């Protein structure tokens, strides 16, 4: 199937289909209850750092604190999602090294089909800290493939 051209009912031809970019808003969820191994609560610092890094890059995104992402043994944890894009979940992030990586990832997410950020565009801390990658909800329930 030619995925770059289609014919409309009036026989006009569309040469390029719109790219399936994630629709706004992209949501970044930061766990504010994550604790370091010595018991210090580190989640709020991560939330502040991620918010600042996104502001610095002028990225339009919704950032929200969440109570737990069920990855408590790998603090701090952050999820990136959108209504029709992939959901990514990361752990082992530190405010000073993870926040800019998350901001950069969100920029790539917004520019990638279904938010599927290419591996080469992911910072090392995110490659190592990857916990989960969940396909968009509207993908085929039969085999998990992209919609046609
Ligand atoms: S307390 Fe942060 S993931 Fe559970």
Image: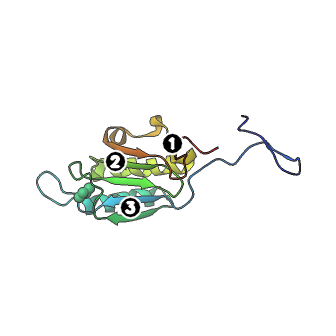
Residue 118, placed above or below residue 58 = above
Q: Is mark 3 within 8 Å of ligand 1?
A: no
State the residue at coordinates (60%, 45%): 147
- For the residue carrying disc 2, how many other residues have a C-alpha within 10 Å: few (<14), some (14-19), or many (20+)? many
Which of the two discs, 2 and 3, labels the residue nearer the N terminus? 3
Q: Position of residue 122 (x, y in %)?
A: 42, 40
Of labels 1 and 2, the one closer to you: 1
State the residue at coordinates (45%, 60%): 27
State the residue at coordinates (46%, 51%): 106
Q: Please give left or right for residue 139 compared with residue 120 in the image.
A: right
Ligand 1 picture quarter: bottom left
Q: Which mark is residue 51?
A: 3
Q: Please give left or right for residue 83 compared with residue 1 in the image.
A: left
Of labels 2 and 3, the one closer to you: 2
**Separation (CA) of disc 2 from disc 3:** 16 Å
Q: Residue furthest left?
A: 38
Q: Which mark is residue 144?
A: 1
Q: Residue furthest front?
A: 142
Q: Please give left or right for residue 124 compared with residue 113 in the image.
A: left
**Residue in the foreground of this view, choosing between 69 and 55:** 69
Residue 6, placed above or below residue 56 = above
**Separation (CA) of disc 1 from disc 2:** 22 Å
* Image quarter of the N terminus: top right
- For the residue carrying disc 3, how many other residues have a C-alpha within 10 Å: few (<14), some (14-19), or many (20+)? many
Q: Which mark is residue 90?
A: 2
Which of the two discs, 1 and 3, labels the residue nearer the N terminus? 3
Residue 91, placed above or below residue 124 = below
Q: Which mark is residue 6?
A: none
Element on which disc 2 rests: strand
Q: Position of residue 30 (x, y in %)?
A: 33, 59
State the residue at coordinates (29%, 48%): 93
């Amino acid at each position: 199937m030619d995925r770059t051209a289609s014919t409309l009912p009036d026989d006009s031809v569309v040469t390029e289909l719109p790219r399936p970019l994630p629709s706004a808003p992209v949501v970044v969820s930061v766990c504010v209850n994550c604790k370091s191994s010595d018991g210090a609560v580190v989640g709020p610092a991560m939330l502040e750092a991620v918010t600042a890094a996104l502001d610095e890059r002028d990225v339009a995104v919704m950032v929200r604190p969440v109570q737990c992402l069920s990855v408590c043994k790998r603090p701090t944890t952050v999820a990136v999602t959108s209504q029709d894009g992939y959901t990514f979940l990361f752990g082992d992030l530190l405010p000073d090294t993870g926040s800019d990586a998350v901001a950069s990832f969100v920029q790539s997410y917004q520019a990638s089909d279904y938010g599927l950020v290419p591996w080469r565009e992911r910072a090392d801390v995110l490659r190592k800290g990857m916990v989960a990658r969940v396909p968009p909800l509207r993908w085929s329930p039969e085999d998990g493939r992209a919609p046609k």
